[in-house]
Image (tube, grey):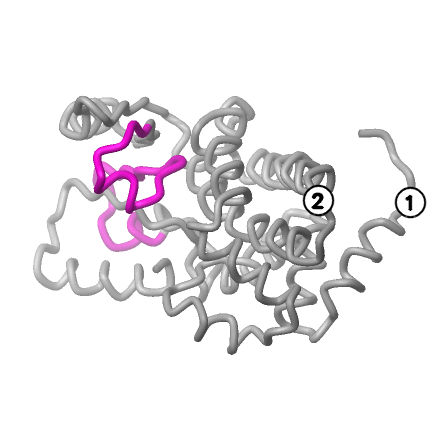
């Protein structure tokens, strides 16, 4: 999980203070400073080649050898190519990206939207509402990503729309299951116990909300999800708040 990333970097820095290359598949922000994980890594290993592996990847399906496409983003063309070639197989198709920021933003924020999609489905709102959450959620992610220095095409690709669609629509997603449980009356703590695994979107909702405020980005789905997770707002009230928003141009 992303909240352990800083500690891992600390340990690595003690063992290998001159580390020149680092890659990770963690999706999230640093909870202390709301930083990108690449910023955390850069602080420990200045000048290092950094890479993140992201995209629509349920671990079980990858392990089963089912067809999967991923994104490898790096601040180094050499490292990105090297990692992509190492990961390529008959079932794995890597794509290279130079947008280290956008890939990380997409991979983190989609977990918050998956909780929102789970809430919508858990309340029985159907496919129309789910599609709206995914579409408007992508707008929110893109706005934040662009404000932070990401590139728009990233959010239309595997690390953006691809990962968002996967996480919002399939019950292998722990974050989606969190939303389903909340909609059915469980508390956050009860839902975590039921799921029995890390639900990254719970922490990420708090971090994304802070980043949205910092960059002056409007993220209403994120805000309402945060209110449900941390302020005791009911899922039904959160949906009503979103529907009551003033009409605006898409």
Front disc: 2 or 1: 2
Label ID, residue 162: none
Residue 248 position by quadrant: top right
Q: Along the line of sight, which residue is nearer the eye, 91 or 50?
A: 91
Question: Measuring 70% from the left and 75% from the top, which residue is drawn there?
Answer: 232
- Whether the magenta-drawn stretch holds residue 67 is answered as yes
Residue 89 placement (x, y as % from top left): 17, 24
Residue 107 placement (x, y as % from top left): 44, 43
Q: Earlier in the sequence, mark 2 or mark 1?
A: 2
- Whether the magenta-drawn stretch holds residue 101 is answered as no
Q: Which residue is mark 2?
A: 126
User: For the magenta stretch, what is the residue range?
Assistant: 40-68
Residue 88 placement (x, y as % from top left): 19, 24
Horizontally, is 109 left or right of 75 in the view?
A: right
**In what element is the residue under mark 2?**
helix
Graded by Cα atoms within 10 Å as few (under 14), some (14 to 19) or many (20 or more), the crowding at tag 1 reads few
Q: Along the line of sight, which residue is nearer the eye, 28 or 170?
A: 170
Graded by Cα atoms within 10 Å as few (under 14), some (14 to 19) or many (20 or more), the crowding at tag 2 reads few
Residue projecting furthest to the left:
15
Quarter of the picture containing the N terminus is bottom left
Question: Measuring 69% from the left and 50% from the top, which residue is drawn there?
Answer: 221
Contact? badges 2 and 1 (CB < 8 Å): no
Residue 76 position by quadrant: top left
Residue 23 position by quadrant: top left
Question: Measuring 71% from the left and 53% from the top, which residue is drawn there?
Answer: 124
Quarter of the picture containing the C terminus is top right
In this rendering, the answer to whether 199 lies above or below 155 is below
Horizontally, is 209 left or right of 80 in the view?
A: right
Q: Which residue is mark 1?
A: 246
**In what element is the residue under mark 1?**
loop
In this rendering, the answer to whether 80 lies above or below 105 is above
């Amino acid at each position: 999980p992303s909240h352990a990333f800083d500690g891992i970097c600390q340990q690595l820095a003690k063992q290998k203070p001159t580390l020149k290359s680092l890659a990770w598949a963690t999706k999230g922000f640093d909870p202390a400073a709301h930083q990108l994980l690449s910023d955390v890594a850069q602080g420990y290993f200045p000048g290092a080649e950094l890479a993140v592996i992201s995209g629509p990847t349920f671990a079980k399906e990858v392990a089963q050898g089912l067809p999967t496409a991923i994104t490898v983003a790096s601040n180094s063309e050499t490292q990105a190519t090297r990692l992509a070639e190492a990961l390529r197989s008959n079932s794995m198709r890597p794509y290279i990206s130079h947008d280290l920021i956008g890939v990380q933003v997409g991979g983190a924020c989609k977990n918050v939207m998956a909780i929102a999609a789970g809430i919508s489905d858990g309340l029985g709102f159907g496919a129309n509402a789910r599609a709206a959450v995914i579409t408007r959620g992508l707008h929110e992610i893109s706005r934040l990503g662009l404000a932070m220095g990401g590139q728009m095409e990233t959010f239309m690709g595997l690390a953006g729309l691809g990962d968002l669609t996967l996480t919002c629509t399939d019950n292998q997603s722990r974050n989606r299951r969190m939303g389903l449980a909340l909609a059915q009356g469980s508390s956050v703590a009860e839902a975590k116990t039921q799921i029995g695994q890390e639900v990254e979107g719970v922490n990420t909702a708090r971090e994304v909300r802070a980043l949205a405020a910092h960059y002056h980005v409007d993220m209403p789905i994120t805000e309402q999800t945060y209110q449900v997770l941390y302020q005791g707002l009911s899922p039904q009230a959160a949906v009503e708040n979103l529907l009551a928003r003033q009409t605006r141009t898409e």
